[in-house]
Amino acid sequence: MMKAALLGYGTVGGGVDRIIQERDDIRITRILEKYPKPEIADRVARDMDEIVADPEIDIVIELLGGVHPAFEFVKAALEAGKHVVTANKALVSAYCKELTALAEEHGVAFRCTPAVGGGIPWLHNLARCRRVDEIREVRGIMNGTTNFILHTMLSGTAFEDALKTAQELGFAEADPTADIDGWDIRRKLVISAAVAFDLLAKEEEIPMFGIRTITAQDIANFRTLGRTCKLMAYGTKSKNGVSAYVEPTLLLPNEPEASVPANYNTISLDGKLNGIQSFYGQGTGRFPTAANVVSDCLDILAGERDFYAKPVPASVDNSDAKHAYYVRTAHRDAFLTGNCVTEGNGFVITKDISVDEMHRWAKEKAASDPALFFAAIR
Amino acid sequence: MMKAALLGYGTVGGGVDRIIQERDDIRITRILEKYPKPEIADRVARDMDEIVADPEIDIVIELLGGVHPAFEFVKAALEAGKHVVTANKALVSAYCKELTALAEEHGVAFRCTPAVGGGIPWLHNLARCRRVDEIREVRGIMNGTTNFILHTMLSGTAFEDALKTAQELGFAEADPTADIDGWDIRRKLVISAAVAFDLLAKEEEIPMFGIRTITAQDIANFRTLGRTCKLMAYGTKSKNGVSAYVEPTLLLPNEPEASVPANYNTISLDGKLNGIQSFYGQGTGRFPTAANVVSDCLDILAGERDFYAKPVPASVDNSDAKHAYYVRTAHRDAFLTGNCVTEGNGFVITKDISVDEMHRWAKEKAASDPALFFAAIR
């Protein structure tokens, strides 16, 4: 019987508690929650110190989200010799090196499979695969909220309405910025590349463009082009570090990511021995994510002690990344005219442009045309 | 350093040896092979007794294929306290209960992830998932050879030519019966259902129809119907056991299995907490399968000791399974006329028919019309 403390009793935390209550190999004895509900009153902890000082607690499950105080709490737990499972991508992306080292020093496990892909056992399998294979690329749909919005828009729904539905279903936060502007998927890309290549890229160096400005007219244009738009993340080992970027991408109908519905994700690796291997499942949602949290706990109970990799800091190097783009802007300029190959209803298809150059141009341009949208055509 | 014996030095065995030669945590010290090649002469074992008697060997990797003498060899290895990894679906499907019990008795691991899905970590993940979730269904494309043939036929190639190409590429055996008539995928279904439900169905009770009689004209007909044909296996927990069957199935373009190319497989579970989770990768081929064999060895090295489940014998019960079918036969009869909803170029689309009834009819009918073909429309 393993005893666990739960930090955060929100959507996923409540789900974890529900799942664990039906098990006899693990029990949640302490819960840290700012707004405790009556049903957990007998297990609520006064503060993190009480949890750290409790010698009976073997494992701390961190579901607070955000970097602070999650970092301080997880650090204290590891230093007290407790295993940690977290679904917090912001924390792992920012502090994976420090926390991995701490876990190693104290002989405990630090696991975060649900941090990337919700219910999908992606990190677990990426680590299992890379023990044998050389990973050449990681890529995919890694954000369930934006996939839900893009899928809903296929039937003609406006962005705002699709977002509202996602919020009502619990697939999007009240403040959707992290999802729709790409912060969330970028963190997942950092973590995936770290596990795949042992290279820890800095979030802020990775070019990122989200779907906040996509319109029903864009979706109609993509249909005319015979393509479907998905928010994709790509990570490849490059000459001088990691090539990594996040951008809406127009896929052909037979590409496996093109038909991923609702809040589902598809995340893939390309290995020297394995070729493409893909993992599909719900990328957000209470019970899929909670089930993956519990799976990580059971892996620890079965003896798992590692993090997934030992990443070292690395630069982002997109020097080899270039492809065509769909660009919609109200203000055509010399850059766009010079790169235009063909044009349609208010949009331009460009020739191959370097990813860095495209993202830099769009960032500058957005100051005068905040409604600008672009998507890759690979 | 773990020491291993390899039984069988064919396509996959040679691949395993190549991968392990570059590692320093495992070494192949003995190889049992009927037709030894000069490059392995210094490691060839005289017979299985020599391997069983060698106290230095920790793990036996069985890649002989076929039930005998694989069963006797694996049994002897387990009884001698050696772990076993096998890719042999015929063996596991037939003897999983006996071998699991032996492994437990002797405190060693019996693993077979590459037995289903080649390079795909399907069984490993199915077992990881079912510790937490209740699995409602397993299904998918579980045979790389037939998927390669069906995919090749999409461009107008005849069955015989597609099969020949598969053989040339090492994706099909000289005798392709096990693949094209469905024996191979049926065994994989038995193993998948055993791990998912703890219920061990008898192979011979599972209705099975393969793709031996599919023609270029059938493929053209499916295109007219807006569908793609895949050889699918389905397993569901039913009231009185397991509902399980194998049949060609006509999928809509947006179904995830519809666009699976070449020798790739997609295998899925449907879990109460997780919903659909799918695993995609190369279902046959030297290095993907060999990499999965080595991954199983490394799981054992990391402390894995279980089989994936403890299945008990169960009956096949398809009483709830019924759907429409595409049927092409030269000899229309009362059964077909009575069930016909619409017809096309030499084929009939039926109303919903029970799976058992359809397979029974086709088996009888094939005596007079061996070219008969049918496929499910779910």
Image (cartoon, coloured by chain):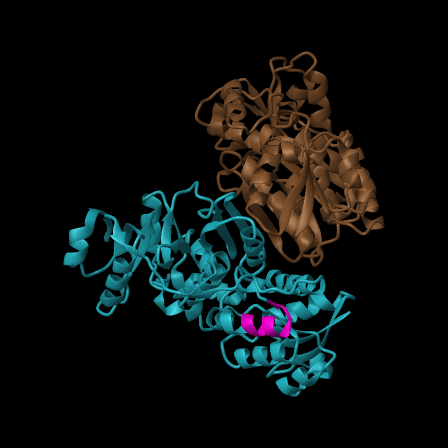
Chain colours: A brown, B cyan
In the rendered image, which quarter is residue A346 located in? top right
Question: Which quadrant of the figure contains the N terminus of chain B?
Answer: bottom right
| Count of numbered labels shown in the rendering | 0
Q: Is residue B203 above or below residue A222?
A: below
Q: Is residue B275 left or right of residue A193?
A: left
Q: Position of residue B142 (x, y in %)?
A: 48, 58
Identify the residue at horizontal 64%, vertical 34% (top origin). Answer: A42
| Residue at the right extreme, as displayed | A105
Q: Is residue A272 above or below residue B64?
A: above
| Whether residue A125 is visible | no
Report the magenta residues as a range.
B100-110
Residue nearer the viewer, A213 or B156: A213
| Whether residue B172 is visible | yes
| Residue at the front extreme, as displayed | A42
Q: Position of residue A199 (x, y in %)?
A: 78, 44
Q: Position of residue B141 (x, y in %)?
A: 46, 55
Q: Position of residue B37 (x, y in %)?
A: 66, 80
Q: Is residue A365 left or right of residue B377?
A: right
Identify the residue at horizontal 19%, vertical 51% (top origin). Answer: B339
Q: Is residue A12 above or below residue B180?
A: above
Residue nearer the viewer, B350 or A68: A68
Residue nearer the viewer, A24 or A286: A24
In the rendered image, which quarter is residue B160 located in? bottom left
Identify the residue at horizontal 37%, vertical 54% (top origin). Answer: B238
Whether residue A228 appears in magenta in the rendering, the answer is no
Question: Which secondary structure type mostly characterizes the magenta part of the structure?
Answer: helix
